Image (cartoon, rainbow, N blue to C red):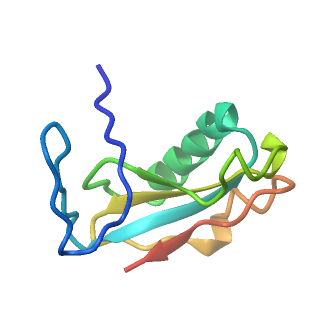
Amino acid sequence: MVATEIGWPVGDDVAVESPVELTTYPASRALVFKHVGPYDELGRSYRLLSEVIERNGLTTVGDPVEWYESDPAEVPDPQEYVTVIEWPIDPDGELDQSRDVFTKRAGWSAPAVRS
């Protein structure tokens, strides 16, 4: 079973009522990937991220988070949807840029490590 959370950034002074909950995510290092295209193609991006994690010996320390930069009500073409995937990783380990599997595929952005 997959657990899913849906949310958006809010200020510290926001009050919520059940069943809504406030969640604070700790700062962490993350592998970040910008997916451009339909939501039903996100699986390709996750497979590529998984490859990068495995090939670089990185360790995930949390579930990935998706940030939707496009609003389908404002962007009618699914090929133009922008989704940023942030996958928390352990502070140890480095991303070997010479083994970049992303730039070899047209239209894909290289991942970045965000601390």
Q: Where's the C terminus, which quadrant?
A: bottom left
Which residue sits at x=33%, y=34%? 4
| Vertical arrangement, residue 110 with respect to residue 114, above or below | above
Position of 87 with respect to 74 (left or right) is left
Residue nearest the viewer, comparing 77 with 110: 77
Position of 42 with respect to 57 (left or right) is right
Residue that lies at the very extreme toward the top in this rendered image: 1
Question: Looking at the image, how many numbered discs can be counted on the residues?
Answer: 0
Residue that lies at the very extreme toward the bottom in this rendered image: 115
Find residue 96 and report its horizontal and vertical position in percent.
Answer: 55, 71
Q: Where's the N terminus, which quadrant?
A: top left
Residue nearest the viewer, comparing 32 with 101: 32
Find residue 107 and report its horizontal and vertical position in percent.
Answer: 83, 56
Find residue 74 and report its horizontal and vertical position in percent.
Answer: 74, 52
Which residue sits at x=62%, y=39%? 42
Position of 8 with respect to 109 (left or right) is left
Which residue sits at x=54%, y=50%? 49
Which residue sits at x=76%, y=57%? 108
Residue nearest the viewer, comparing 85 with 95: 85
| Vertical arrangement, residue 2 with respect to residue 70, above or below | above
Find residue 83 and report its horizontal and vertical position in percent.
Answer: 61, 54
